[in-house]
Image: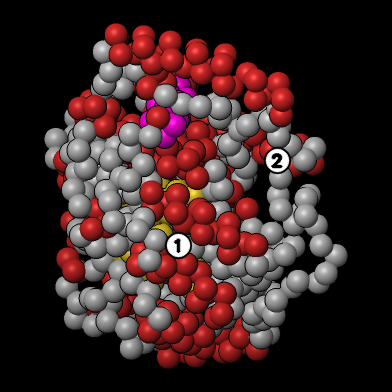
Amino acid sequence: MYDDEDLAEIRESRDEWDEETLDPTLDAYGERKDRFATVSNLEVDRLYDPSDVANLDYEEDLGNPGEFPFTRGPYPTMYRGRTWTMRQFAGFGSAEDTNERFHYLIEEGQTGLSTAFDMPSLMGIDSDDPMALGEVGKEGVAVDTLRDMEILFDGIDIGEVSTSFTINPSAPVIYAMYLALADQQDVPREQVRGTLQNDMLKEFIAQKEWVIPPEPSLDIVTDTIEFAAAETPKFSPVSISGYHIREAGSTAVQELAFTLADGFAYVEDCLDRGMDVDEFAPQLSFFFNSHNSIFEEVAKFRAARRIYARVMDEWYDADADQSKQLKFHTQTAGQSLTAQQPLNNIVRVTIQALAGVFGGTQSLHTNSYDEALALPSEEAVRVALRTQQIIAEESGAADSVDPLAGSFMVESLTDEVEEEAMEYIETIKEMGDGSVRDGVLKGIDEGFFHREIQESSYEYQERVEDEEEVVVGVNKYVSEEDTSPEVLKVDEEVAEHQRERLANVKKERDDDAVEAALEDLQDAIDNDENVMPYIVTAVKAYATMGEIMDVFEAEYGEYREKIGLA
């Protein structure tokens, strides 16, 4: 973007500034610390100028919004057309409790629903299982059968709302229940909108929720992608999630690299099944964390779009623009929230939300200030939602497409993040002898991802304990005053109520229909068929979450990690 003569003059001017202006100031006053760095420990230079982006090619590296390589955003007008989808995580107690919260959020102006499930539902077991004791409705909403889903969305037209489901091992069952509900409401499946997290590779890397081993888990994810391409073209069957990788302690670069590698692994698995890349790729979505270092996060999001566009074009021969457009949801960093002085979290979340907006997210979840203590209260949820609304309506941040483009710092960081992330992706590809999918599976098996994240997490904690990394209210500006707010508590009666409903469903359903549906599912697995149609049939017969997942566990067995962390 600059010719050699201009750059030479800029460098000469910079040298003069260093000698005549900067050095005397440093001699007299110094700086407040020896080294400045992002949360991920990427060093931040004192000053950026055109020489830091001397190799930037506008057409090749930036382009215009809505055009390859989509660095500046997947759509030409971005938030000038419409703002991002505003989602707040909702889910606690019974289906009735969460349905009430859904209606509250819609009335407060939320534009998309986001559903959290309790641990038994996440792990594919029923509320009456002994392993569910003490966990029913505690971390999210309890869903055992289609009856719970009917209550969860009572009074909500799922043809009019986009719903996100944060669930993984048992995600195909929840997807099937949602489709069964759409059929009940006479909503055409091609009109159903939403997102299923369903990212099992991330589970084995970071979040550690699974039922069966990695390879059959990958097969089932591919089943949902194949089924969704044919049945629900407006629904994203997988949300490839870096969020949990970051929450486990990774750096921003690791989050980006490992997430994209997982995405490319799904692409390769679909291609190996014989699907056309342009048939399914437009429905793939991503999910990233947004942390405190605002410029690093913006750079990460912009680098993500550029890497994805280039790899989908060059490695996987995608033709349609929609197949090269990385679209993503963002959630502010739960790991950054503190139990100490929890109102400080409002400021953290605002900074992180701004990073997501400046980075061009398609939807956004802002954490509530009390989430380090409990599930969010109504007041905390409202503040979190108002944070998004103020950014959208009052700040001006949504008025310009890619407002930080051209910043020497942002463009330099974008290049740096892209380069380091691609080094990781190439390493993973080499581990798989040219296949990213095989490299990811090998990395899981050999503990590669675990060790990389563990080392980064340990280094970050060391910096916090040495006060090199400041956490306000924790290792600096500490207060002895009790600042804990009132928190949401889930009544123990919820579990009893849920078990009673489950027992009634089992008593009223047609057991022969359930048994036949589960046998058909087993036959589909044995015959290597797509399992989704059979899961839909089973949930319509009111088979339980646990009964359906037991079929898979009986076929593939449990999974335990082979490799410990070094």
Tag 2, which secondary structure? loop
Residue 211 figure quarter: bottom right
Q: Residue at coordinates 65% horizontally, 62% vertically from top-left?
A: 344
Q: Residue furthest left?
A: 319
> Is residue 245 rendered magenta in the image?
no
Measured as percent of width and height from the top left, residue 313 is found at: 22, 30
Residue behind mark 1? 365
How many C-alpha atoms fall within 10 Å of the one at disc 1: few (<14), some, or many (≥20)?
A: many
Q: Residue at coordinates 44% horizontally, 54% vertically from top-left?
A: 354
Front one among 557 and 76: 76
Measured as percent of width and height from the top left, residue 397 is found at: 36, 55
Residue behind mark 2? 469
Tag 1, which secondary structure? strand
Q: Residue at coordinates 32% horizontally, 60% vertically from top-left?
A: 84
Task: Say which amino acid is labelled 2.
Answer: Glu
Q: Is residue 291 above or below residue 345?
A: above
Measured as percent of width and height from the top left, residue 107 is found at: 38, 84
Find the magenta span and give its range.
409-425
Task: Say which amino acid is labelled 1.
Answer: His
Front one among 532 and 440: 440
Q: Is residue 302 above or below residue 518?
A: above
- Quadrant where the N terminus is found in the figure: top left
Q: Is residue 203 above or below residue 537?
A: above
Front one among 226 and 461: 461
Residue 31 appears anywhere in the view: yes
Left or right: residue 280 versus residue 458 is left
Residue 503 appears anywhere in the view: no
Q: How many marks?
A: 2
Measured as percent of width and height from the top left, residue 510 is found at: 37, 85
